Image: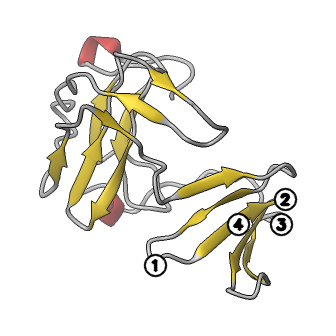
Amino acid sequence: MKHGRVDTDNGYEQTFTAVSRPPYLTALAMWPQGDTWGGGGRFIDDHTLHLAYAAHGTSHPGVADTQIYMAPVPEAHPQHQPRGLRIETEFDHYAPDAGFLDHVASDGAWIGADHRGRRIIVRDGRILVGDPTGGETLLKDLNADTKRRVISPQWARNW
């Protein structure tokens, strides 16, 4: 979501789904949306994106179980085409959290899995990985990070 002035004359909307090169948020591919009801998606592999749009509504049966009932996906923005990506959208409904986000714990921790199937816990500004014995290992503590303006390098602005 972009707050403030939006260049609607050139096809941009205040809300959108975009693909970027982390950690930079420069949109390489973008699908304007215009509201916050749905959108988003999930990479299935390095070249396949399950893209979701939900004009038919969303439901959250549990705290973290998102079910998106599909609507036709709008065209990609002309200046942000999904080059080299296979976009899949033909679903009756789509559960982007399935196998990824297990639940949100009572202490507010987000518990899910990463692309390698490891149990990931996000709690109190820290990212941890769980082991089979129930222990946790710190991957990254984000608490010391400070807000700063970052300009994406050229390699992160192009396909």
In the image, taking residue 23 as reference, residue 154 lies left or right, namely: left
Amino acid type for the residue under numbered disc 1: Arg
The residue that label 4 is drawn on is 121
Q: 37 and 97: which one is in front? A: 97
Please tell me which of labels 3 and 1 falls first in the chain: 1
Amino acid type for the residue under numbered disc 3: Ala
Label 1: how many Cα within 10 Å (few below 14, some 14–19, many 20+): few
**Comparing marks 2 and 3, which lies closer to the viewer?**
2
Label 3: how many Cα within 10 Å (few below 14, some 14–19, many 20+): few
Query: Decide: marks 4, 3 in contact (CB < 8 A)?
Result: no
3D distance between C-alphas at marks 4 and 2: 10 Å
3D distance between C-alphas at marks 2 and 3: 12 Å
SS assignment at label 4: strand
Tell me, for residue 144, which label it has, or none. Answer: 3
The residue that label 1 is drawn on is 116
3D distance between C-alphas at marks 1 and 2: 23 Å
3D distance between C-alphas at marks 4 and 3: 18 Å
Q: What residue sits 37% from the left and 36% below the top?
A: 17
Rendered view: 151 above or below 121: above
In the image, taking residue 145 as reference, residue 71 lies left or right, namely: left
**Comparing marks 4 and 2, which lies closer to the viewer?**
4
The residue that label 2 is drawn on is 124
Q: Is residue 14 visible?
A: yes
| Residue 65 percent location from the top left of the image | 55, 41
Please tell me which of labels 2 and 3 falls first in the chain: 2
Q: Is residue 159 visible?
A: no
Total tally of numbered discs in the picture: 4
Amino acid type for the residue under numbered disc 2: Asp
